Structure formats: structure tokens, C-alpha cells
Amino acid sequence: MAKEKIIIENTSPNRVYLRAVEPEDYLTSYRWRSNFEALQYETHRYVSKETERKWVLKIIEEHETGKSVRLAICLKENNQLIGYIHLSDIDYQNRSCEIHTLIGSKEHQGGGFGTEARIMILRYAFLELGMERVRSRIIANNAGSIKSGIKSGYTYEGTLRKAVFQDGQFFDVLLFSILKEEFLQKFNG
């Protein structure tokens, strides 16, 4: 991977780096969407290859125009794409945004890769974008993401009851956030 394509790289012993999403990434994320287990906590699954291709091109455009920051999570050891991380609803006036994390590669779920990526993008949100507060919404039955959020320094704020309908049933959505001062204290800036 060319160095200039790397957007966020941590010099610590992290196993991942974040880079701009590339047009050919749709082939990998399309495979993820075909695997129920890999995306069991996602609300948008099972799309056609063409729909996935158009979605990837759209997120590249949104990233290039500054509407959002959506990056690919890649392994340092072999540059393999294993997920996406996304800053959305970026509000520069109130200095807040929301993070969405997806580790689509089933074999890399539960290994701490999402937590590493989340900490990297939190640092970017607070120190580069000037955010004061970052929030996340996590489906209540997604124990791995809840654990990752807590390891990333998040504080539980509340519950949206029966907010997501998935696989024939309703699930609560848990609200979490972290403030800049909390992040800097926990991760030493």
C-alpha cells in the first residue's frame, strides 16, 4: 500500500491502519454482506454487487467533499481490508459527531481490531477535527461492540427502546459517548 494512501497510522504497536476507501473495496464488502454471521448486528445486509459498488462510490464522494469521514480498516501486516469506520453527522458548530464501526471480516471480529480503529479515529476526531463529543449507537445484543466501546472510554448515556427491527424482532439501541477531556485523560492525548 502506498504511504500516501494511508490516512491514519498509529506508530504504537497497533495492528491496523486506516486509509481512504477505494473503488475496488466493494468486492470485499460485498462478500461480507453475503455472510449472515459476519454482519449479524448490521441493519443493512444482503445487497446486490451493483448496489454495493454504487454505495462504495458514494462514500468515496462524500469523503472527498468533506460530508463525512469513512475509512477502510486494514491490517498492517498484509494490507487486508477487514472493515470500515465512519464519522457521520459531523457538526462543527456543536463540535460533535457519531462513529460507526464495522469489522466485516468474520475471522477478525472479537480480536480487538475494531477497538484499535475506534481509538485511532477518536484521536483524529478530537485532535484534528476539533470535536468535543463523539457518540455511538450500539444494538443491545451486540456484546462485542459494547465491550469495545467501553474499552475505548465511552460512557453509557441511555437506551432507545425497541429501536431496531431485525430478523423478526425488535432490539434496543444503547447510546454511548466520550468527551475530548475523557479521551485525553484515558489515552494521554
Image (cartoon, rainbow, N blue to C red):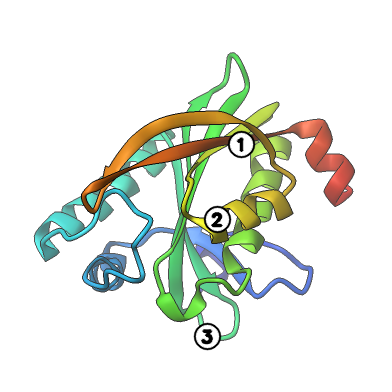
Residue corresponding to mark 3: 78
Q: Which mark is residue 22?
A: none
Q: Residue furthest top?
A: 93
The percent position of residue 111, horizontal first and vertical second, equals: 60, 74
Q: Quadrant of residue 182?
A: top right
Mark 2 residue element: helix
Q: Nearer the viewer, mark 2 or mark 3?
A: 2
Q: How far apart are the two marked residues, 2 and 3, measured between alpha carbons?
A: 25 Å
Residue shown at the point (61%, 36%) measured from the top left = 176
- Horizontally, residue 24 falls left or right of residue 123, namely left
Is disc 3 surrounded by few (<14), some (14 to 19) or many (20+) residues within 10 Å?
A: few
Check if mark 1's residue and mark 3's residue have beta carbons within 8 Å.
no
Q: Is residue 50 left or right of residue 1?
A: left
Q: Residues within 10 Å of mark 2 (few under 14, many from 20)?
A: many
The span from disc 1 to disc 3 (Cα, nearest Å) is 32 Å
SS class, disc 3: loop
Q: Please give the count of numbered marks on the rendered protein.
A: 3
Residue nearest the viewer, comparing 189 with 171: 171
Residue at the image position 58 percent from the left and 14 percent from the top: 93
- Residue at (52% x, 85% y) in the render: 78
Q: Which mark is residue 145?
A: 2
The residue under label 1 is 176
